[in-house]
Amino acid sequence: MASQVVQFAGLSDRDRKTVTPLPSLAEGDHVEVHVRRRDGREQTLSLPPAAISAVETLLSRLLNGERVAVLTEDQELSPTDASVILGISRPLVVHRMDIGDLPFRYVGKHRRASLKDVLALKEMLDARQKAMDALAEDTEDLVVNHGL
């Protein structure tokens, strides 16, 4: 699959205040999307049950002020796209590829990593950062409270 630019979308504060949150849904509830086109035509689309959870999550995150992007698990990302998700620079992503932390393949001369592998690396980096933060707190506690 070709790489696509990762684009995040979000709602403005004004839009967040005017949008009515989706009510809590129960099993068996049916969700339809009503579309009114510019030319006045109207269309109603029924969402399959598997899509309802994704739509609920998407709307909830947007209404909480978060920015979201929709990607497929098997999507391939360029180092630039991966850097956006990982929150690190593109050269650091390439370094992670070179040292084997992030599996990739070449498409011509361009590197591509799967979203699944990028998210696995992000989970590892986040866990490592959390452990380092806890260690720093413990060290500060030893210095402040125990004079070490």
Image (spheres, rainbow, N blue to C red):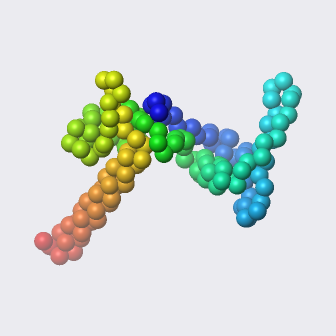
Considering depth in this image, is 134 or 85 the residue closer to the camera? Answer: 85
The x and y percentages for residue 147 are 14, 73
The x and y percentages for residue 41 are 86, 29
What residue sits 73% from the left and 45% below the top? Answer: 18
**Can residue 91 be spotted in the picture?**
yes
The x and y percentages for residue 84 are 41, 38
The x and y percentages for residue 52 are 68, 53
Q: Which picture quadrant has residue 22?
A: bottom right
Considering depth in this image, is 111 or 91 the residue closer to the camera? Answer: 111
Using residue 36 as the reference point, say whether residue 97 is left or right of it: left
Q: Residue furthest left?
A: 148
Using residue 44 as the reference point, say whether residue 52 is left or right of it: left
Q: Is residue 53 above or below residue 17?
A: below
Q: Is residue 127 above or below residue 33?
A: below
Using residue 125 as the reference point, say whether residue 147 is left or right of it: left
**How many labels were placed on the picture?**
0
**Can residue 133 be spotted in the picture?**
no
Considering depth in this image, is 5 or 10 the residue closer to the camera? Answer: 5
Image quarter in which the C terminus is found: bottom left
